[in-house]
Amino acid sequence: MDQRSIRLAAESVEPAPFAIPGATGGTFRIQILNEDAGRGVVTSIVHIPAGGRIPAHCHRAGSEMHFLLEGDLRDGGEEMAVGGFTTQAAGVVHGPHESRGGARVLTVQSWQSSDGDFDFEPAAEATEATPTGELQDGKLPQGTMKPVDQGAQEQAREEAATPEGKGYS
């Protein structure tokens, strides 16, 4: 999905406040862009407020992916650039997620919460170890930040700085 497609999808959905267990720093909002209950896949934009923090946690029901659309984000203590992404397998502890100035994060989850039951297990209760980020058999393990080429990062920054690229507010 390119930046324009994300912007167009986001324009038709009003961000709604939602509670994240243990989150601090203001009101978190979400835009559900697509739900496929049959496959258990949800695509959304999570709006992290300035000063917002989501504690380290895991999801037992399935994997998820985060793509930073706009703003600043620290994931597990590492700065993520606009255009950067992370993936986490089911049961892998990740986070905390923190933003100084606020962020908009495209999130794809291969699981679905229902009836207010949110698959969110704080790290203090999680039993799986967080990957170290070291190469294993020449590959980055699941749950670590993937490198993004500098050209793609610069293009994402330019698009975010133009009125056409700011469809996420």
Image: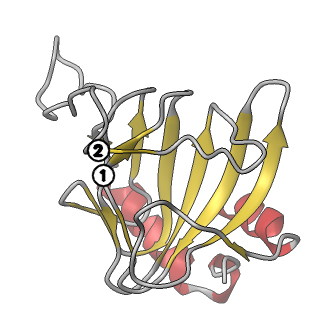
Check disc 1 and give the amino acid type: Ala
Pick the front one: 167 or 63: 63
- In which quadrant of the rendered view does residue 58 lie? top left
Q: Are marks 1 and 2 in contact (CB under 8 Å)?
A: yes
Image x and y of residue 156, in percent: 48, 67
Does residue 1 appear in this view? no
Residue 152 versus residue 129 in the image, above or below? below
Which numbered disc flags the more N-terminal residue, 1 or 2? 1
Neighbours of disc 2 within 10 Å: few (<14), some (14-19), many (20+) = some
Check disc 2 and give the amino acid type: Ala
- The residue labelled by disc 1 is 56
Secondary structure beneath dot 1 equals loop
- In which quadrant of the rendered view does residue 144 lie? top left
Residue 146 versus residue 160 in the image, above or below? above
Image x and y of residue 95, in percent: 30, 52
Residue shown at the point (38%, 68%) measured from the top left: 154
Image x and y of residue 84, in percent: 39, 55
- Please indicate whether residue 78 sits to the left or right of residue 155 in the image: left
Residue 3 versus residue 109 in the image, above or below? below
